[in-house]
Amino acid sequence: MSTQGINQLLGELRAMSSLAAGQAPAVDKTAPEVDFSDVLKSTLEQVNQVQNTSLELQKQFELGEEGVNIQDVMVSMQKASLSFQTMVQARNKLVSAYQEIMNTQV
């Protein structure tokens, strides 16, 4: 995942936090504008690519192709599992934050 997207998101969260505290938000002019949907799409594509790579290695191992060993297959399966679990946890945090914002009384 791109650290640029994470830095952009953190900057926006800090600006919202200072705005909620009644302070003027600090504007960072050096950070390029990044669309959240692009960052999310890119992250989903990376997770999908890791899972597809894992599935391909599994198929190659099952077919007995040369150069594919069980260690590589297991490592790729763990990478796919971890990336998916990370994505699910990030989604859960985003949904929780959205629900909290929607429940905030103005």
Image: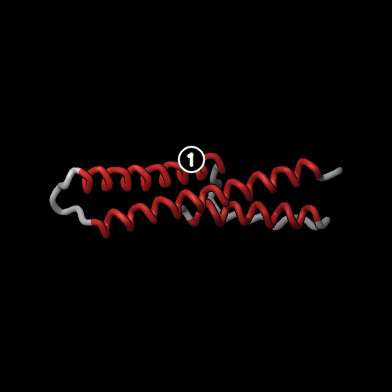
* Label 1 element class: helix
Q: Amino acid at mark 1?
A: Lys
Q: Which residue is located at x 70 percent, y 58 percent?
A: 26
Q: What is the image's colouring? A: secondary structure
Task: State whether residue 39 is above or below residue 24.
Answer: above
Residue 61 rendering spot, x and y as whole percentages: 22, 48
Residue 23 rendering spot, x and y as whole percentages: 80, 58
Instruction: Please identify the quarter of the rendering in which residue 95 is found.
Output: top right
User: Could you tell me which quadrant the C terminus lies in?
Assistant: top right
Left of 26 or right of it: where is 50?
A: left
Q: Which residue is located at x 41 percent, y 46 percent?
A: 46
Quickly name the residue at label 1.
41
Name the residue furthest right: 106
Q: Nearer the viewer, residue 57 or 43?
A: 57
Task: State whether residue 22 is above or below residue 35.
Answer: below
- Report the number of discs: 1
Q: Nearer the viewer, residue 30 or 17?
A: 17
Q: Which residue is located at x 37 percent, y 48 percent?
A: 50
Left of 60 or right of it: where is 5?
A: right
Q: Nearer the viewer, residue 99 or 4?
A: 99
Q: Which residue is located at x 50 percent, y 54 percent?
A: 4
Mark 1 Cα shell of 10 Å, populated few (<14), some (14-19), many (≥20): few
Residue 35 rendering spot, x and y as whole percentages: 55, 42
Name the residue furthest left: 66
Q: Nearer the viewer, residue 13 or 92?
A: 92
Left of 32 or right of it: where is 101?
A: right
